Amino acid sequence: MEMKPYLVAADVNRIAEASRAEALKHGWKVSIAVVDDGGHLLHFQRLDGAPPMSVAISQAKAHAAAMGRRESSQFEEMIANGRTAFLSAPGLHGLLEGGVPVIANGHVIGAVGVSGVKSSEDAQIAKAGIAALG
């Protein structure tokens, strides 16, 4: 039997705080979601002034990255390159840049999804949060 790591509350808090700090450093008004490896919400925060739509989008991006085991930007690229049938994939939404998986020892153990600014900036915030894990 193979053993795999998983996110604990302290990890989730480090990710959330580092993501928040990155957003605040740039004055970005975003929503940030952290999920487990099954895409289930572990932490959510909507910074002051973040658009209401960013709540659902951040959570969907995190879910897509966790379930798809890759950055959500890869799904966006597939669709933009003509693979529009992928839009019918069951249970996947948020197929836009800004969802980043958390990987430990080769296992996807969760993901971070951010929404509210440019997609590349959303991804920057998510990656800053994940980087706090070391």
Image (cartoon, rainbow, N blue to C red):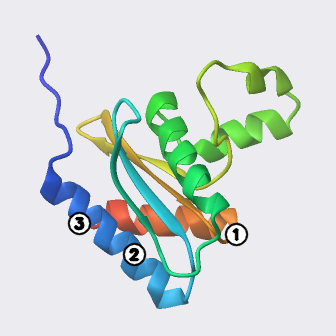
**Residue placed under numbered mark 3 in the picture:** 14
Q: Secondary structure at mark 3?
A: helix
Q: What x and y, as percent, mark residue 114?
A: 53, 60
Q: Is residue 133 visible?
A: no
The answer to which image quadrant residue 2 occupies is: top left
Which amino acid type corresponds to the residue marked 1 in the rendered image? Lys
What residue did someone put label 2 on?
Answer: 20
Could you give the CA–CA distance between mark 3 and mark 2, rounded to whole angstroms?
10 Å
The amino acid type, in three-letter code, at marker 3 is: Arg
Local crowd size for mark 3, using a 10 Å CA cut-off: few (<14), some (14–19), many (≥20) = some
Horizontal side of residue 87 vs 132, given as left or right: right
Q: Regarding mark 1 in the picture, which secondary structure is present there?
A: loop
Chain-order first, disc 1 or disc 2: 2
Q: CA distance from mark 1 to mark 2?
A: 16 Å
The crowd level at tag 2 (other Cα within 10 Å; few <14, some 14-19, many 20+) is many
Q: Is residue 95 above or below residue 27?
A: above
Residue lying at 65% horizontally and 65% vertically, measured from the top left: 120
Q: First in sequence: mark 3 or mark 2? A: 3
* Position of residue 53 measured from the top left corner of the image (x, y, whole percent): 66, 59
Can you say whether 67 is above or below 43 in the image? above
Nearer the observer, 4 or 105: 4
Type of amino acid at the residue the image marks with label 2: Arg
Residue assigned mark 1: 118
The quarter of the image holding the C terminus is: bottom left
Q: Residue at x 48, y 76 (%)?
A: 47
Q: For mark 2, give the secondary structure.
A: helix
